[in-house]
Image (cartoon, rainbow, N blue to C red):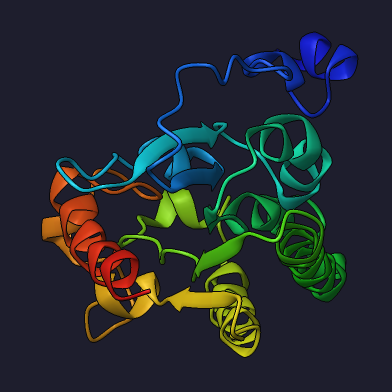
Amino acid sequence: MTESLGLDPYELSTYPTNPDLSKRDLNKPLVVFFGDSRAVAWPAIANIPFEFINRGINGQTTDQVLGRLSAHVASLSPQIVVVQVGVNDLRDFAAFPNQSQNIVNKCKQNIQKIVDRLTQELKATVILTTIFPTSELSPSIRAYWPEEADRAIIEINQFIKSLKSDRVIILDAATLLADERGKVRQIYSRDILHLNSQGYTMLNDELLKILTNK
């Protein structure tokens, strides 16, 4: 995997960079799910007049998502892009504890760039989701995911909310998913970082309201 990433750091080979658009229903707005594994797992909403394409890739950082935007999203000319990114940047907290604020700042900068390119270059509407919180962590996992990373999610989510505009709609997934401790509710959790189908059903209920009220 490491060797393949060295040859293809943005994992451009995961999706066609010149997709066949001949079968697109041009009467339906195109919604693209874009980001990391949490975007990969996000299911399309059935029986509504929108077309859905997924362009998530497992494990990607905001650097990687930004680096493949032209190849994987711009080539589709979507009207709407649902963006879920950021959590994988924070894996570096354990390895580089003295760089935590630099990691957070870089994450914010990349999210800003992703949003700017989607809205300004592609003229797409962005549905920007806050970063999903983690589930309850065991002591052994804490060695790899320090409490500073949880606090960073809160800080980055505040930044994400500040990006709201006429072309950027905020889907506050973190608030919808979290319990009173700020952790993902157990009924929505698949594992430490990911949601189960019930979690995505709840998010799609909110996404449906956004799409049908646009």
| Residue 10 shows in this picture | yes
* Residue sitting at x 80%, y 59%: 117
User: Which quadrant holds residue 158?
Assistant: bottom right
Tell me if I can see residue 178 in this picture. no
Residue 40, x across and y down, in percent: 44, 35
Q: Is residue 114 above or below residue 53?
A: below
Spot occupied by residue 202 in the image (x, y as percentages of width and height): 17, 61
Taking the image as shown, residue 91 lies to the left or right of residue 55, namely right
Q: Nearer the viewer, residue 114 or 138?
A: 114
Query: For residue 176, what is the image quadrant?
Result: bottom left
What residue is rendered at 57% in x and 64% in y? 126
The answer to which of 20 and 84 lies nearer the viewer is 20
Vertical side of 103 occupied by 51: above or below: above
The x, y position of residue 192, in whole percent, is 36, 49
Answer with left or right where residue 16 lies relative to residue 64: left
Residue sitting nearer the eye, 24 or 60: 24
Residue 208 is left or right of residue 50, and the answer is: left
Q: Nearer the viewer, residue 164 or 35?
A: 164
Query: Please, is residue 23 above or below residue 153 in the view?
Result: above
In which quadrant of the rendered view does residue 11 lie? top right
Q: Identify the residue shown where x is 33% and y is 71%.
A: 210
Say which quadrant the C terminus sits in: bottom left
Question: Residue 134: percent from the left, percent from the top?
Answer: 39, 61
Locate the N terminus and report the quarter of the image it occupies: top right
